[in-house]
Image: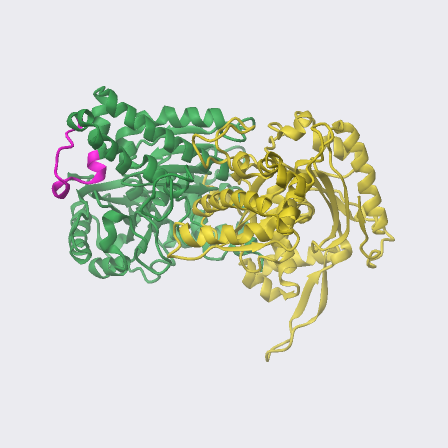
Chain colours: A yellow, B green
Amino acid sequence: MGGAARAIPHASSRAAVLDVIRAAGTISRVGLIDATGFTGATISTVVRRLIQDGLVLESGRAESTGGKPRVLLQLNQSSRYAVGVHLDHAGIAYVLTNLGGSVVARTARPGVGAEEPQAVVDRMSGEVEALIDGAGVERGRVLGLGLVSPGPLTPTSGMRLTPPSMRHWEDFPLDRALSEATGLPVILDNDATAAALGEHWSGLVGQTSTFAALYMGSGIGAGLMVNGVAYRGASGNAGEIGHICLDVDGPECWCGARGCTEVLGGPAAVVAAARADAKVARAAGLTGRKRSRPSVAAEFAAVARAARRGEPGARAILERSARYLAVAARTLANVMDVELLVLTGPSLAIAGSTYLPVVQEELDRAFFPRAAHRVEVRLSRSAATASAIGAATMVLQSELVPLRQGLQLPDNLSDSEPAPAHLTSA
Amino acid sequence: MGGAARAIPHASSRAAVLDVIRAAGTISRVGLIDATGFTGATISTVVRRLIQDGLVLESGRAESTGGKPRVLLQLNQSSRYAVGVHLDHAGIAYVLTNLGGSVVARTARPGVGAEEPQAVVDRMSGEVEALIDGAGVERGRVLGLGLVSPGPLTPTSGMRLTPPSMRHWEDFPLDRALSEATGLPVILDNDATAAALGEHWSGLVGQTSTFAALYMGSGIGAGLMVNGVAYRGASGNAGEIGHICLDVDGPECWCGARGCTEVLGGPAAVVAAARADAKVARAAGLTGRKRSRPSVAAEFAAVARAARRGEPGARAILERSARYLAVAARTLANVMDVELLVLTGPSLAIAGSTYLPVVQEELDRAFFPRAAHRVEVRLSRSAATASAIGAATMVLQSELVPLRQGLQLPDNLSDSEPAPAHLTSA
């Protein structure tokens, strides 16, 4: 059976219409027909149901262009919400977004460190509850929870080949445990893919619906968006540029291969190089003993701050890392033929300004089809939280219907705006 | 405007239905509704037009399962044809396929060599005419010509950044010139992408609609299929794994970068290594002076034959090349997260059995999400002609409608099968 046709299932028409309304802000039914290619009858039916379900509002009319003025549609932003959680060794970021993907509440909490998985899940459950309650949002309006974390996911649940810092999470059924603890449906995905989705919804990438988000947190990865849809590959593990080979005779990586981007130029390599240089180590304050050391991400941030203060050794180490990341970015661009790369993730939130010119220069110089077009490199405006935002939008994108068939809203639930966003920091 | 919805335009419903009928062999209207997700009304309209246009036939009824037996639909294989041309320095391969993508005629002719582009186009025009006439196919039934060549392509026409052997083709408006010479609509694309499409249509990849074709001809590239659709990227230049970096300090490549797969392990590197070893050069018969040398592909084939005869030096050179290709294949698999890699292209038609185990071993050992799934590596059954077949299927896939709006079939044109396939070799 041809895959092309299979990609256009019944259920997605509702999601496609919702996504067009979201991206357009306001749009008429005729505009929806143009944008989706669906028939007038399909649009009419889908829109009627969306209005019945309270997800879409009629909001005035477009200026007349001679004929009858057209009714404009828009999302009912506060009709539904989603929780996004980015779980990493170094920190856990939480966001609550409305149906349009706007963040209405956010929290940052300590990472998983050496804690036992079940203890972390119990803590997360309380933190999610506090987030929703603090925003004054009815639980019945929360569609679900998107949970994203580093590294390869298995199709069933949980992480399998985990980075060294989270080895004790291997085989832990993370999504099931968190769903039981919170009572919310949970979607599990890769944090780099989520970051790409977050950038898409946040609007930075504008009209470019095919792009890659180059992610650096504790590790390095990439999220891929193709025609506005996250490209996940066969098992949800696409975009693993942290583990492509930049040197066939290079040092061994924790993943079992040699000369990976991550082992040559990732945050841990930067920290190791900084520790090996007494002057840089002192400037960055990397003095802790092995047992009491902060996370790699925190130490990387300290090196980046030293570089920003003008410490030449720290600058040189970061620039060497940036050159490896730039070559990996070029490989990604050559394979996917993208027009836009967004630098994102917690580590690039701090050091992005050092990496951006090096990556752009590499692509301008050596992107293979450079005669056909340029690859533009941009720094994310929400690099630290893009993954958590993307995690929440995964819930929104999952079309409401398949995720939570029997969603019951309380009868007396009003459509009033929730309390203003609150920002808590650990 | 969200890209997701844009990907479902009106015009493609016809193509989607045709593709499902093609892949299924025979299928009922109800089967089409299930497979495409379109409404019964849409399927009914699209099928009626396809029958009116002579592209689809009703062909008996399915076994009754209690209710009314269902009418089965199938392609009218001999209602339309397409020409596929694979243009390379070393050779030009031609195929004529019917609407189902089956090859009804094929020819192989000398490559472009040092000939002037316009002279090659004039020669190709005659060779295309001979192919169609020889097969006894009415010109009016030929939808168009798919022309594929080594990348990168520019969005407008022709090649821009050409490999060294075809430098004199830079800026030549290849598609326009060939369309003028043959009177057929011409689609221009990358030969590696075409190879992937050819593998998809030829049925080797079976149900796996997301896979990569790893192509080696004179150069190295890859074609990507995602859900049965060729993934082309922003400018039709996706999959350029010949020019990803495997050694940041490696030798300079003709593309301007360092340590590319092609410069380290491509056919030209194999030939250079064989020439540098007097014993291997002798065994492979690489004796020609610089001016009179055959093409890189022909010399690569000579080294591969020497390796097959057991010449240890030749074997060692090929195995080194295979290790580079294997690492590039792993990068491709890590970025795209594919389940299947098909080794294809003229050079792998000859040396594929040496490369296959090395590539498979590398992926088994170090594919990043190997805990989630294995990447299977297969050798194409039509490695030498996959690109030409893919070129023809591009014409078929372009949905007949947009390519040739006013296609006029002669009134007296019968639906009889054309003369049997003929095979000419230069």
Q: In this view, does B239 lie above or below B306?
A: below
Residue B337 visible in the snapshot: no
- Comparing B290 with B75, the one in front is B290
> In the picture, which quadrant includes the C terminus of chain A?
top right
Q: Position of residue A115 (x, y in %)?
A: 76, 29
* Residue A140, position as x, y percentages in the image: 81, 46
Q: Residue at the right extreme?
A: A412
Give the quarter of the image for residue B313.
top left
> Looking at the image, how many numbered discs can be counted on the residues?
0
| Residue B103 in picture, x, y percent from top left | 27, 40
Instruction: Say if B35 sits above or below B280 in the image.
Output: below
Q: Was residue B146 drawn as part of the magenta stretch in this picture?
A: no
To which quarter of the image does residue B121 belong? bottom left
Q: Look at the picture and state if A363 lies above or below B364.
A: below
Residue furthest out toward the bottom: A66
Left or right of residue A339, residue A120 in this image: right
Q: What stretch is highlighted in magenta?
A: B284-299
Please name whichever residue, A287 or B32, is drawn nearer the observer in this view of the structure: A287
The answer to whether residue A59 of the structure is visible from this angle is yes
The foreground one among B297 and A301 is: A301
